[in-house]
Amino acid sequence: MSEQPLSRIERQLIAATQHGLPLLERPFEAVGAVVGLSEDEVIAQLAQMRARGLIRRIAAVPNHYRLGYVANGMTVWDVDDAQVDELGARIAAQPGVSHCYRRPRHLPAWPYNLFAMLHGRSRAEVAQQAEALRALLGPACRGSDILYSTAILKKTGLRIKE
């Protein structure tokens, strides 16, 4: 990943696209009209930004609630610290995991150091996925829980100021 600061045009491109691409036949041409570049220049700039790790991808972001995935559970795991990085990478590679983080414990009340978000059409489906993760963690897992979402108060990616 790049450690270089954003150039003026990179910042402008992020600001012009961070709420999504325009739903037009030629979205990159429309973005170029905003930032003063041609369609080809926008595509080339975005490709360079992707190569530098400034953006991960350009893709549709489905609304999982509208698709019927209404049971969303943050699974929390108390995993042996000596194995958490290796096991966390294995958990992160599972197809049902959308987010996976290692975070510090806050003992004695909060023993969990590994977090993985699961989505399902029901809590039973999420619980089944969590059981698969537990099997993957094996004896390194000393405890776990599932924290289900009950309301969306805000959901967005990082936004930068123009």
Image: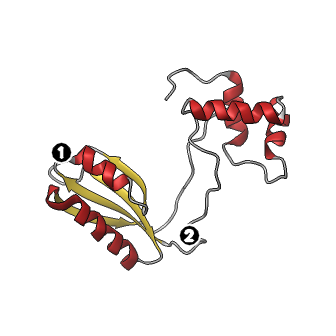
In which quadrant of the rendered view does residue 161 lie?
Answer: top right
Q: CA distance from mark 2 to mark 1?
A: 34 Å
Q: Is residue 114 left or right of residue 39?
A: left
Task: Say if 70 sits above or below 78 in the image.
Answer: below
Identified at 58% across, 38% down, the residue is 55
Question: Can see residue 80?
Answer: yes
* Identity, as a three-letter code, of the amino acid under mark 2: Tyr
Q: Is residue 53 above or below residue 60?
A: above
**Where in the figure is residue 44, as x and y percent of width and height?**
72, 32
Q: Secondary structure at mark 2?
A: loop
Q: What is the x, y in percent for residue 40?
A: 80, 34
In the image, 79 versus 110, the foreground residue is 79
Find residue 81 and name its label: 1
* Residue identifier under label 2: 65
Which numbered disc, 2 or 1, marks the residue closer to the eye? 1
Mark earlier in primary sequence (2, 1): 2
Return the mark for residue 57.
Answer: none
How many neighbours does mark 1 have within 10 angstroms: few (below 14), some (14-19), or many (20 or more)?
few
Residue 111 visible in the picture: no
Left or right: 11 as drawn, with respect to 5:
right
The quadrant in which residue 46 appears is top right
Picture residue at 79% right of the left edge, 41% below the top: 28
Q: Nearer the viewer, residue 131 or 22?
A: 131
Identify whether 51 is placed above or below 140.
above
Describe residue 127's horizontal placement relative to residue 59 as left or right. left
